[in-house]
Each structure stands twice: as structure tokens, then as C-alpha cells.
Amino acid sequence: MKKALKLLLIAGTFIVLPLVMTAQVPPHPNGGGGPGSGDIPVGGGAPIDGGLSVMLLLGAAYGSQKIYRIKK
């Protein structure tokens, strides 16, 4: 009975908690202006390729290390 009550309490917490918690609305990228009025694009100014190329390089290095160890 204690185990079922504990499980019900945990499940209830996970169901109710997202309904109670709220996040702040992020600011508009152009400081509140229209889509063409600022110097920052609407999608933001973060480059996509920086992290992707690092992850590809690390994956290639890890794969080549595994192949080297298998052949050794």
C-alpha cells in the first residue's frame, strides 16, 4: 500500500507541476521593433554551423580511434 501511495504521489507531482510552472516570455530579437527594423535577424544571430562541425569532428575522431583499436 505504501508503494502504491508513493507511486501515486510521484505521478501526481509530475502531472500537476507542468501546469503550475510558467516561464517568462523571451524578448523580441529586435528590441520590440518590427521584423525589418533592427539589425538582428528575426531568427537570431547565432551561427548553426559552429557546434555542428565540432560534433562531426569529435565523432570522426572517436570512430577512427575505435577502428584503430579494433585492428590493433
Image: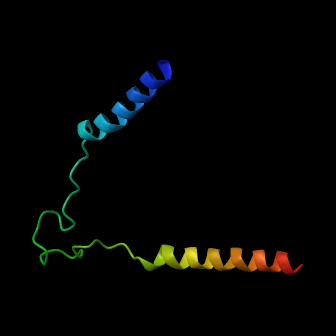
Q: Residue at x 39, y 76 (%)?
A: 47
Which of 44/22 is in front? 22
Q: Residue at x 36, y 37 (%)?
A: 14
Q: Position of residue 33 (x, y in %)?
A: 11, 68
Which of 14/59 is in front? 14
Compared to residue 72, the image places residue 31 above or below, namely above
Q: Position of residue 26 (x, y in %)?
A: 23, 56
Question: Does residue 16 appear left or right of residue 8 in this picture?
Answer: left
Which of 14/6 is in front? 6
Compared to residue 20, the image places residue 53 above or below, namely below
Q: Residue furthest left?
A: 34
Q: Residue at x 53, y 79 (%)?
A: 53
Q: Residue furthest right?
A: 72
Q: Residue at x 13, y 74 (%)?
A: 35
Compared to residue 27, the image places residue 59 above or below, namely below
Query: What is the quadrant of residue 58 in the picture?
Result: bottom right
Q: Position of residue 42 (x, y in %)?
A: 21, 73
Query: What is the quadrant of residue 43 in the picture?
Result: bottom left
Compared to residue 17, the image places residue 5 above or below, namely above
Which of 54/39 is in front? 54
Q: Residue furthest top?
A: 2
Question: Does residue 4 appear left or right of residue 69 in this picture?
Answer: left
Question: Does residue 60 appear left or right of residue 7 in this picture?
Answer: right
**Which quadrant holds the C terminus?**
bottom right
